[in-house]
Image (spheres, rainbow, N blue to C red):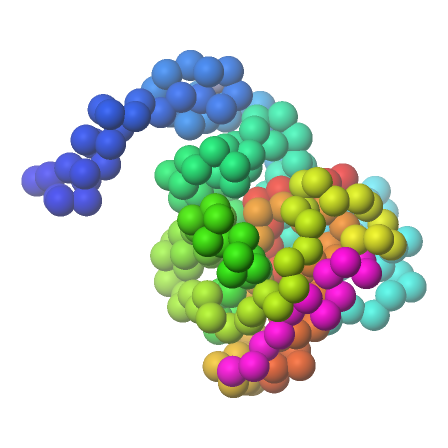
Amino acid sequence: MLHVGDAVNLALDCLFPQQCVGCGRIGRFICCDCSAHLPFLHPPLCPHCGQPQMSGILCANCAGRTSSVVFIRSAFRFEGTVRQAVHELKYRKVRAIGPLLASYMEPVLREVDYAPDLIVPVPMHPRRKRRRGYNQADILARSVGRLVSIEVRTDAVQRSRDGVSQLQSGTGARRWSNVQGAFACTNRLVSGKRVLLVDDVCTTGATIEACATALRSGGAAEVAAMTVAREV
Ligand SMILES: [Zn+2]
Ligand SMILES: [Zn+2]
């Protein structure tokens, strides 16, 4: 039997047929050929930041630094078809691609065997969210939450300062100072909880670190993070 949601999706598919973000073929967001060549991130990885690391021990960046986040993991390298898919989700309002990307995050979460109490998307500044109409991290977090049956809270942490966009801002020290103190966690709902932060892309890890610091100040017992992709 066809459910209402299925019927709506079917109607939407007819109105807006899915097109492969990799090659343009009509049918699915990522066609079979392109899905066979996705840039998966495979171990060995730095156990903390998830960068590919031949030795599988802490990378030079993580070794000398204390952190508010226990680990960061990503499904993909931020390149090729995945870069295009994130771009569609983020800038071209193709929200329906979110659940597909989240479906690749779920096995990574199972692989690290992490069971958080709460899933929290990295928030967008309210002004930016109004302009875009949605936060892509909310879509990803809700989709992952549905797949692993864990509660998602989009109100756990607030973005009090609007930084430049992740994909456009510079790298290194400038970005770290850009996002430091950009988040605030004022309600107590994270108190004592193990939180999984979800975002689309991890570039330097600065945004995740700043957000995790706010959550820990708000009482979170532990914060881990997952993104669709990361720069390597
Ligand atoms: Zn394709
Ligand atoms: Zn590292």
Q: Give the percent coordinates (x, y) of residue 183.
A: 64, 69
Q: Is residue 203 left or right of residue 223?
A: right
> 133 above or below 33?
below
Q: Residue at x 13, y 44 (%)?
A: 4
Q: From which residue to which does the magenta span run?
A: 176-187
> 15 above or below 185?
above
**Is residue 183 inside the magenta stretch?**
yes
Q: Residue furthest left?
A: 1
Q: Is residue 89 left or right of residue 161?
A: left
Q: Residue at x 87, y 54 (%)?
A: 173
Quadrant where the image shows the N terminus: top left
Quadrant where the image shows the C terminus: top right
Can you see residue 90?
yes
Q: Quadrant of residue 31?
A: top left
**Is residue 100 inside the magenta stretch?**
no
Q: Give the percent coordinates (x, y) of residue 38.
A: 58, 28
**Number of marks present in the image shown:** 0
Q: Is residue 138 left or right of residue 28?
A: right
Can you see residue 57?
no
Q: Is 24 in front, or is 91?
A: 91
> 139 above or below 189?
above
Q: Give the percent coordinates (x, y) of residue 88.
A: 50, 33
Q: Residue at x 46, y 66 (%)?
A: 154
Q: Residue at x 56, y 65 (%)?
A: 196
